[in-house]
Amino acid sequence: MGAHVLRADARGTVVRVMYMAGHIPPERCWYLVSIGNAAVRMLSFDDVKLLESPWR
């Protein structure tokens, strides 16, 4: 399991989490962590596609 911050600004922090699900490459999921109240919301790939880089 690993995580990477894709964006941090006044709107919140977008984090990509990569985890092993029995195959390579690992699965990915994305979360938005709100600055004000630390609320966490799961995002879809469409929400983060401009922030993501392609798999190498």
Image (cartoon, grey):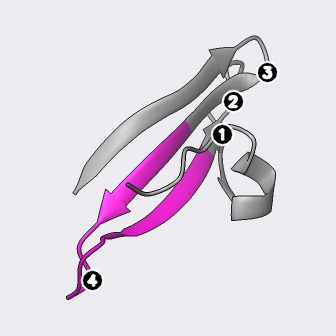
Identify the image quadrant of the N terminus: bottom left
C-alpha gap between disc 4 and disc 3:
31 Å
Q: Which mark is drawn over residue 34?
A: 2
Dot 1 and dot 2 residues touching (CB under 8 Å): yes
Q: Nearer the viewer, mark 4 or mark 3?
A: 4
Label 4 element class:
loop
Quarter residue 25 falls in: bottom left
| Position in image of residue 35 (x %, y %) | 67, 20
Magenta residues span 15-31
- The residue to which callout 1 is attached is 39
Which image quarter holds the C terminus?
Answer: bottom left
Q: Secondary structure at mark 2?
A: loop
Mark 1 is surrounded, within 10 Å at the Cα level, by few (under 14), some (14 to 19) or many (20 or more) other residues, namely few
In whole angstroms, how far apart are the C-alphas of marks 1 and 2? 5 Å
Query: Reading the chain from its start, which is encountered first: label 1 or label 4?
Result: 4
**In the displayed structure, does residue 52 sit left or right of residue 56?**
right
- First in sequence: mark 4 vs mark 3: 3
19 with respect to 22 (left or right) = right
Residue type at mark 3: give it. Answer: Arg
